[in-house]
Image (spheres, rainbow, N blue to C red):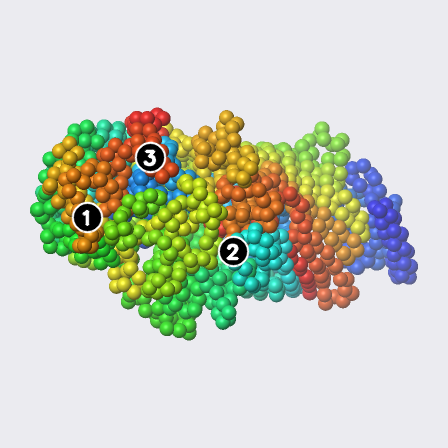
Amino acid sequence: MKKGFSFLSRVCLCSMYMLLSSLWAFSQSRTITGKVTENPGGTPLPGVSVQVKGTGKGTQTNTSGVYKLEVPQGANTLVFTFVGYKKEEVVLGASDNANIALTADVTGLKDVVVVGYGTQKKSEVTSAITSVSAADFRQSGARNAMDLLQGKVAGLTITRTGGTNPNTGVTIQLRGVTSLTGSMSPLVVIDGIPGGNLDLLQQDDIASFSVLKDGSAAAIYGTQANGGVIIITTKRGKSGPARVDYNTYFRKEYVQRRPKFLTADQYAAKIASGDIITEDKGYRTDFVDLLVNHSNLTQNHNLAFSGGNDMNTYRASVYYQDQDGLMLANSRQQYGGRLNVTSRGLDNRLTASFNLSTNFNKANMLTDGGNLNGYYTFNPTYSPYNPDGSYYFEQTSTNELARLHQQTDIRQQQTTSGDAKISLDIIKGLKASIFGSVIRDTWTEGGYADLNSELSYETYDSTGYAWQANELHVKYALEPTLEYNFTVNNAHNITAIGGYSYRYEVDQGFDAGNYGFVNDVFEENNLGAGNQLGLGKANMGSFKNDNTLIAFFGRLNYAYKDKYMASFILRREGSSRFGANNKWGYFPAISAGWNLREEAFMSNLTAVDQLKLRVGYGITGNSGINNYVSLVTMGTGGNYINPDGIWRQTYGPNRNPNPNLKWERKAEVNIGVDASLFKGRLTGSIDVYKRVTNDVLETFTTQLPPFVRNSIYANVGSISSKGLEITLSGNIIQSKQLTWSTDVAFSTNRSVLDRFSNDVYKIESKTYGGIGGYGALGDAIRTFEGDRIGNFYGKRFAGLTDDGKWLFYKADGSKVSPDQINSEEDHAVLGNAIPKYYLSLTNTWHYKGFDLRVFMRGKFGFDVLNTMEMFNGNRQSLPSNVLETAFTKHAKLNDSYQYSDYYLEKGGYMKLDEVTLAYNIPFKTKLIRNMRVYVTGANLATITRYTGNDPDFIKDTGLNPGIDALNTTDDRRPYLSSRGFILGLNVGF
Amino acid sequence: MKRFKKITTYTALALLPVFANSCTDLSEKVYDQLITDNFYNNKNEVVSAVLRPYTHANAWTTPGQNGWWRLSELSADQLAWPQKGRHGYDAGNWIRLHYHTWTIDDGPVRDCWSLLWTGLGFCTDAIENINKREASAMGLTQQEKDGYVSELVLLRAFHYLRIMDIWGNVPIVTQVGIPLSPETKTRKEVFDFVEKEILDNIDKSPVLSKSLLGRMSKAGGYAMLVELYLNAEKWTGTPRWDDCINAANKLINNEAGGMNGALELDPNLTDTYKPDNDLSKEIIFSIAYDYQISNFTPQWTGDFYHFNQSQINGNTLNGNDGVVVIPGVYTTFENADKRKKEWILEGPQWRYGSNGTVPVISSGGNEYNGEQLVFVDNIRKNKQGSTVSDMTQGEENSGVRFNKYKLGPTSDPHYRSTDWAVYRLTWVYLAKAEAIMRKNNGAATQEAVDLVNAIRKRAFAPEDWGTHEYTTTTLTMDELLAELGRELIFEGYRRQELIRWGKYTTASWWDHSASEGFRELFPVPQTQRVLNPNLGQNTGYPN
């Protein structure tokens, strides 16, 4: 195929060349001929574009690399361009012959990488940094900016535990777990704003992501960098005529992979056959279907204007988005805009850049999938209605359909950020800048339960319940920097930057609720109209807390002839959250790189375009803990009667003090190789790393007595992880008409809880992942010192007795009933919840105006605890509705719920995540610059042996991963899995 | 060099503001919390700290959490929390308590340790903070200051008493945080310490009056002495029957005050347990609640109530269908004994106010979903026709249920405000009777019979009384234990009683068979022993 296309294309090109030549034959001009070859090697290059500079005239080289071009009088420069090679210009002399050799361009468009407080040439980067630009983003319509990156960066785990709920974010984790109780997410920096708000980012406004993965890159962000750093750059205007870009898509979603509970007919049949002992109420209801928004339709519109001249550029965009969830009463409408203005003045010595961005959203928060469980298990021979048409209520369950119609929960949020950066070139090479930003995030949320709603009926004496809450979060940052760049002897390039960072964050909120309303008119808009303010059962609360983070930082980059590079970072940072004895810490880093390609001994290896070795070591910290945790505060203890007969609040110490509380400290070594082979046809990076986080904060049991509280928050533990990341890009076919490229991202990581005891504080094991549900089955995950994080630990299934009772193995191998199992002696590691391998694969084809992209994503080597089978695949749950498996796979089981490896399944999967087919409509008019229409199918197929919910939504980050659950505790939201289809359009004027 | 100078100058200028003090200030300003150093500035603040251990005592001395009550009752012969279908396995906690097979790091034991010592710490923290401040600086008179301190010392002694009851040998600590790893003292040493603390402070404490509702007082101090001396033989090896009788007499003779006039027995079976039981004449020390004006409410509904209990009581309170009466206990009440129907729910249940016409229908997808709720005096899978009866074989309606304390229907003006009596005069009567009989080698005297009859008489109609009255012949020690069981059921003292009778680890009941003798004490939690090398383990448990 490849050859065929190439041949055809060449025939076409030659024909065109003949045609053009004949057209220009009569003009006053001269004919230039020449040959284009490759440097080094001298191989002829066919298909190279040859243009006469300043005119529209041009041609291409033939199969022998030869071209022939009529050059009009007055024109004297030819421009040679070819994908993957550096552009060359040749000034014509007297000769009618112009030969040239083109050199492969291995850096191309992505030759600049955004790093902390600046940019760096990619060839000089010495740390593990991955950049992803707009062309590579995921294409199924981001609900959160981080969706665009899912599966695109090796080592960056992004999981949608909330499914496709438009009101939930993602869990993000880079290179494994780095904390037990503090923040584990990467620091997000948007256009320089540390801790930027993702709500402010629309997919069409983002130019690129830069992920600082290792400590040597991230150390410049000090105590916020243990989880890595993601730097996001938004699009900017370019000088030139005004450009208008309009992007839109429409998305429709369908339910897929719905758990197989008995249908109403199956259930009724089992009542008839005596398998289920309960009364057939006569109705046949598909309860879960009542909660599905079958008419969902999501739309997104983004309109951007940009342009400018040499001194000023601008870009302004506005957007509107209406996201429907797959479930009813779950949606998000938002609109807003983003503005960037960059100006230069003072003879180009002064640069000022301003960003202003805002988001208004209105979210229906009433459902998030937490309502599914009750309806999955509801007896389907019931009706949600009474015979008189009113809703059917019973004390111990919630009529979720009624709730959709009788309760509300709406959040209205506005987030705005503004920042300015002013830079002055003081003398050549020395630049002083000051950056300031503010983000203000505020929301009001309110809800109302009708007088006749179940909540009101069962809890508020049928008098309704109304509540409102609002919160305000403001973040300020001020960061002056001084940057100096100079070159010595044309060989030693030094860039130094030093700065100061002051950040202040304050959070406050207020909430109130009331009941005792006479009708449903006010809803939550007149809380005082309820009667409980006087009767003392209205509720009210407020809070406020703040923290300050201050740092001094510096970085020195050194490069010798593009051959040897080194980078040194030092940050001294303090946080108000730390204890009085440990307010400030140092965070140094060093890294070095060696471009082997520049060495003489490599000159004969023509297949290697670029080869760079990187080594880095860096120390970062984590200040992502709650405010005031080092102080002893007096906590409320409930009201008690005072001697005067009045009930007043009681106060007692609610925390043991820890004046030594400090940051968690991570040290990381990263060794990497960047390579480009065969003229850029194969590029890639390999990184290996080992990171150790010490002083990990955890709540420890204290000696009690003599302390008052039984716990203290202290720096004791240690976590380590090591891993391998491989990123590869191959241009398999690269011809004028057809290209086929493949990108692969692979990563593996092993995280171990090394230690959580010291001389003072001791814990023998840590348990996580409360299973919840009936019977309080305890925690699913237990990790001893030195174990992998995410170990399932519990009873080992040994079979069932003849009458269907559980048998489990004791440590000595004997099979016994559950009450004879000793949790200390007989429990064992059953499996592990954290995927060993992540793999994603992007294949992109371009053919003429069409492009097709197929994106696959998978996780391998892990176990999932299928708690749905545990609770619903058991006839013990009858007469609540059960999974079909209660009568098939688990038919023999006749015993209560038990947690054991019986319910562990292999979770590995590969998902056909996105298929996008696009057509670039060619326009002959100058009015339309480009127009692209595309269709995307999202979540089209999943290859897996796992039998529960979509394994993609199961948490694989943090300390409580791998539990596929129906309850909403522990951050598990069992949203319905969906398949989506998108129709999109991009137009540029 | 000139360029270098220039750079240095600019750098210095740029960094100048940075070194100003405010630019490196990381001190914390707390907006919505209190810090101990800024507290105890006026009387209300002092009182709020003095009262903190009481709201905390709600957690451990009443049912509803893993406190003294659960360890004491769920390991004894009257109450249990069996597994009922898919509910109630709860990591096997209740099963192990019932069979006396708890481990050295069992959750309920560990939680109880934590709750009790935290409460004790609240007392000590407040004592230290009040002691180190001048009375005037707190807006108190010296007398008020001394009163608060002695009240707190008595209350701390109450914590030690209960800690000693459960674990026996424990450290004695009177300062917060010092020493870091206190060493275990023998039960005798702890006993002596508690006795001394009470005796040193009892006379400084106010006599009980209405204004001391829910508080430790002189009367509470004597009640503690009764408990201490009643168990002294078991706890120290030395019987103290006369001391027990003397302490009881202080209360019976009304020398320590009463909450509503003179301390006397409530005349009926309901006054002590009704929503406005702050009017009870016999309660000596209680945890006080008021839902209507303070939102501080009893926590025990979760342990006792069925999922549909609210329909029975005409309110909004349901529970986890947990604690039930062990089969065979219900029938130890004679039918003529009014306590049987008044304090225990048995049989078909009807909606509140329907006078037995509208059944309570079970919902929630359990065994009897859609059927009338009927509490049965057995624990087995009747729905499946099974006759196997043990801790794992319950159904949602297994076992008859707690109905001693009443919270009232929603319309009751004192709804959800029923106080929980820690000490009541009835218990003092029974303790005195027991002391008299034990002093008399287990034989009843007329004085002892009169004391027991005084409390028993309330449970019988006048026409039945003649045949149910005790005499010095019928009131044997075994009969006294049975009567204690009936009168004090659900009140938390059953483990102590069984231990005094030597039956806690030797007797069998329902599916429980005799355990090991060392189980009379609970193990010191392993998590604490790992932290504190000076903390010993009780005999019999793995060290």
In the picture, measured across the screen, residue A153 lies left or right of residue A472, that is right
For residue A443, side relative to residue A1 (left or right): left
The picture places residue A256, in percent across and down from the top left corner, at 63, 55
Q: Decide: marks 3, 1 in contact (CB < 8 A)?
A: no
Q: Which mark is residue A947?
A: none
Residue matched to label 1? B467
**Chain letter of the residue beneath label 3 in the structure image:** B
- Residue B168: image quadrant is top left
As drawn, B29 above or below B539: below
Question: What separation in Å lies between label 3 and label 1 (alpha carbons)?
Answer: 30 Å
Question: How far apart are the alpha carbons under marks 2 and 1?
Answer: 48 Å
Name which residue lies at 41% across and 69% down: A451
- Total numbered labels: 3
The local crowd at label 1, few if under 14, some if 14 to 19, many if 20 or more residues have their Cα within 10 Å, is few
Quarter where residue A580 is shown: top left
Locate the C terminus of chain B and report the quarter of the image it occupies.
top left
Of discs 3 and 1, which sits in the foreground? 1
Amino acid type for the residue under numbered disc 1: Thr
What amino acid is at disc 3?
Answer: Ser
Q: At 33% across and 46% down in the image, what residue appears?
A: B325
Q: A637 or A229: nearer the eye?
A: A637
Q: Which residue is label 3 attached to?
A: B508
